[in-house]
Each structure stands twice: as structure tokens, then as C-alpha cells.
Amino acid sequence: MHPIFIKAALKLAETEPSMPFTPSHVARHIGASPKLVFDVINGKRRSDHVERQIAWFTGLKLCELWPQHYAKPITYRVSKALDALRAALG
């Protein structure tokens, strides 16, 4: 998802009009730096904790927010891991 849409999803998820969720609000809530949250939203850095918190705030799935990182079906990853294990065991 484009960073603009992630920021919009945060603002739409606000609990009341006087308190919109912003990247800075997320940073304060989880004890991370605003720069880290900004970089995660803009795709410059990865942080599992920050990504999961943004997903929680927005109510969206990780694969909806960052399909480039989370869109692979679990069956594909499991089958690749099993193939690697079988190759290692001989």
C-alpha cells in the first residue's frame, strides 16, 4: 500500500475527531522514535513491531498494508522450507 494510504488509514481509524492517529501518535504509543515509524510507513526500513502496531491501529491486515512483504501464501513458504529441509537431510 502506498504510504499516503497508510497515513490516511491511520487518520480514518481515529477514536474521536480531536485525537487522530498519526505516525507520531503510533510512535509515542509503542515507545519507538517517530523517525522509525515514518521510515516503516515509507518503506525505507522494516520493523516487525512497528508494522504490527500500524496494522492494529488501522484494523488492516499486514498483507494489505505491505503486500510486497506479506502477500506470499503460507503454503508457498512452508513448501520451500520443507524442500530445503529434505535437501539438507539428503
Image (cartoon, rainbow, N blue to C red):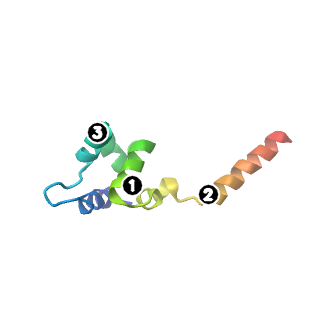
- Which quarter of the figure has residue 48? top left
Q: Tell us which disc is closer to us: 3 or 2.
A: 2
**Mark-to-mark CA distance, 3 and 2:** 31 Å
Q: Amino acid at mark 1?
A: Ala
Q: Secondary structure at mark 1?
A: helix
Q: Residues within 10 Å of mark 3 (few under 14, many from 20)?
A: few
- The front one of 42 and 15 is 15
Secondary structure type for disc 2: helix
Residue 35's mark? 3
For the residues labelled 1 and 3, the Cα–Cα distance comes to: 18 Å
Q: Residue at x 40, y 48 (%)?
A: 51
Q: Is residue 42 visible?
A: no
- Circle 2: is it few (<14), some (14-19), or many (20+) Cα within 10 Å? few
Q: Estimate how packed mark 1 is, as few (under 14), some (14 to 19) or many (20 or more) residues with alpha carbons within 10 Å.
A: many
Please report the residue visible at 74 percent of the width from the left and 45 percent of the height from the top. 84
Total tally of numbered discs in the picture: 3
- Mark 1 or 3: the one toward you: 1
In-image side of 76 versus 88 (left or right): left
Q: Are marks 1 and 3 in contact (CB under 8 Å)?
A: no
Q: Residue furthest front?
A: 15
Expressed as whole percent of the image width and height from the top left, the position of residue 66 reads 44, 56
Depth check: give the residue in front, 66 or 54: 54
Of residue 75 and residue 43, the one placed in the foreground of this image is 75
Separation (CA) of disc 1 from disc 2? 19 Å
Mark 1 vs mark 3: which is more N-terminal? 3
Identify residue type, mark 3.
Lys
Q: Is residue 88 left or right of residue 63?
A: right
Residue drawn at (68%, 53%), measured in percent from left and top? 78
- Location of residue 7 in the rendering, given as x and y in whole percent from the top left corner: 28, 56
Q: Which residue is mark 1?
A: 55
Percent of width and height locating residue 6: 32, 58
Label 2 belongs to which residue?
Answer: 74
